[in-house]
Image (spheres, coloured by chain):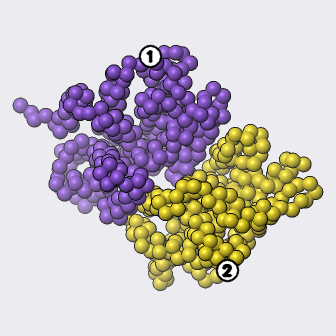
Amino acid sequence: MKRPSPPLITLIAFVAAAATAPWIISDGSISLLFEVLLMLAMAQLWNLLAGHTGLVSMGLQCFVGLGGYTTIFASNSLSVSPYWVLPLAPLVCGLVAAASAILLFRLRDAYFSISTWVFSEVMAMLVFITPGLGHVTGMTLETARAIDYETFLVVNFWIAAAIAGASVLGIYLLMRSRLGLSMASVRDDEIAATSIGVNVWRNRFIAYVVAAAGCGLAGGLSFLAALFITVTTAFDLNWVVAMIFIVIIGGIGTLEGPIVGTVIYYGMRELFTNVFALSGSWYLIALGAVAVITMLIAPTGVWPLIRDRFAIEWLSIKREVPYRYASEAGATRKRSIPQDQSYFV
Amino acid sequence: MVWLGTIINGVLLGGLYGLFGVGLALVFGVTRIVNIMHGEFIALSAFIALGISMLFPQVHPLLLIVPVVVISFGLGYALQALFINRAMRLPDPLAPLLLTFGLSVIVRNLMVETFGVSPRRIGQGDFAQLSIDLFGISIGVLPVVTLTLAIALFLALQFVLRRTEIGRIVRATADNAEVVRLMGVKPSAVYNIVMGLSFALAGIAGLMLALRTAFTPFSGVERLLISFEVVVLGGLGSFWGAMLGGIALGVAQLVGLRLNSNSGFLYGNLVFFVFVMLRPNGLFGARQ
């Protein structure tokens, strides 16, 4: 019998753990895990843009905020359970992303990164000055009365686990598909990608809309669980700052990187604020120091370091050169094979 | 008349914004680094200026420029020499950006721990409040001083880069860091000086900010966005573009606030978008 692959084992273990967790661990741990899983999903999506497609966005908090406002506003004005309107969050965010991409994609590299941030600030101010969205005081989820608090925490946790699982599985399958390969080619060399017939604009567009919709869903659930939203918390730059940290520390352009990064990010937070009982700013200082040290010592991140040291494969999206070509190339054109592994991922 | 006053004050505010951006533009022009720390450094300089003014309360606040420039230059030089040059040697072009990102988080939170989060300002209120009445339009003395200082600094920077030996070396390094090595120039040493200069300019901007309004350790992040916008508007690496970009943002912000007092920086951001869409390489950038 063929041995099951590590990704399949991971998937089964994750589903089993998520399904049974509410009976095994305390409510406090469940709400921590809820936060962790949503952040993992968002980090994976930032990595889909920056690590797999080459689009460094500093504005994904825009969609976290829009997703939150969409969910709470729709639930309040239609007087229905917020769970019914949660799918509107990714829909609205996907549409906004698609419309803004037409403008933002005219810009390149640093211009693009900065403009996505400016775009997020514009959306935040528009939400702020629009009547009926709470202005300074924010909005409370009025349909919260209808919510069954016995199961509220657990249901949210399961949805968060589904979102996180779907983000990892989805990006895994995507990066192993033809579309994923063309996205990687856009990241590695735009001109070469164009010359072999890859539509650069379309690839980036798909990745951007998917990331925005995913962040919208995560933001929607996050503020649904909080029962309350304000412009400052919803469009907070710290959302994207956390995503960037997790991805850089863990390992950009890999699927395992954001998982390792999320563990480090929340592990350090719990350690500093609960075990050492230090203020939040010391935790952030330590996190900044970890990022600086990572950049100077292991610029590719922690996961690639572990992977290469112990020669392990987990959720690898690396592609093998087909046997036929590998032997041919090995025999006759050995020296001209690009050694940079990014050509093969 | 009210509108004329708004526009004049917007232009004066633009002088401060131009100062925010010029250091960032200088570093980008020479090293191609997007320095995320720039905003934090503006806030840190404000605190440094506050500290000195508390030690020597009788000194006129504008004279604080001298110590602030010296300290800032030293900090920028040291930072580049100790950290950023190492990151620049890595093959990944994102490395220096992410490094300055990590440093900015450290600096911001160290400021929170050291100075607290309550708003501070440099005490000499009478100087900040001084204004002159020009045909019924009230114009603050401090903003006029800021704009004048900004223009003087831009001229000086332009002179240094165009007419002096060190300026020629800096421009040559910006053009081709490999070739200048053949002429006996060490690019990393040039980068140290450029980062020092950039921090000195950010230091002056921080001082002018501290004289103008109250500030907290979080003031840097908002100013970083404005600095970025100024630089992008001007075309990355262009100084006069940065000045004009700053003025455009200053006017847009004050006009916007007069139209809707809740709008914050919304109109500035919208003007940024319109300009950037019309000229994706900036007002003074090369056409594609």
Q: Does residue A243 sit above or below B69 in this rendering?
A: above
**B2 or B32, nearer to the observer:** B2
Q: Does residue B269 sit above or below A224 in this rendering?
A: below
Q: Is residue B167 visible?
A: yes
Identify the amino acid type marked 1. Answer: Ala
Q: Which quadrant would residue B205 be assigned to in this image?
A: bottom right
Please state the chain letter of the residue tagged with numbered disc 1 in the rendered image: A
Identify the element where label 1 is drawn.
helix
Identify the element where label 2 is drawn.
helix
**Image position, residue A299 (x, y; %):** 34, 59
Tell me what hue chain B is rendered in: yellow
Q: Which quadrant would residue A316 be assigned to in this image?
A: top left
Identify the amino acid type marked 2. Answer: Arg
Rendered image: mark on residue A251: none
Position of B160 with respect to B29 (left or right) is right
> How far apart are the two marked residues, 2 and 1, measured between alpha carbons?
73 Å
**Image position, residue A30 (x, y; %):** 30, 33
Q: Is residue A164 visible?
A: no
Tell me what hue chain A is rendered in: purple
Which residue lies at the image location 64% right of the left edge and 72% below the top edge?
B53
**Image position, residue B238 (x, y; %):** 64, 63
Q: Does residue A222 sit above or below B211 in this rendering?
A: above
**Image position, residue A244 (x, y; %):** 41, 49
Which residue lies at the image location 56% right of the left edge and 72% below the top edge?
B72
Please state the chain letter of the residue tagged with numbered disc 2 in the rendered image: B
Residue on which the image places disc 1:
A146
Which residue lies at the image location 30% right of the left edge and 32% below the top edge?
A27
Residue on which the image places disc 2:
B163
Foreground disc of the pair 2, 1: 1
Residue at far right of view: B135
Say if labels 2 and 1 share a chain: no
Position of A86 with respect to A14 (left or right) is right
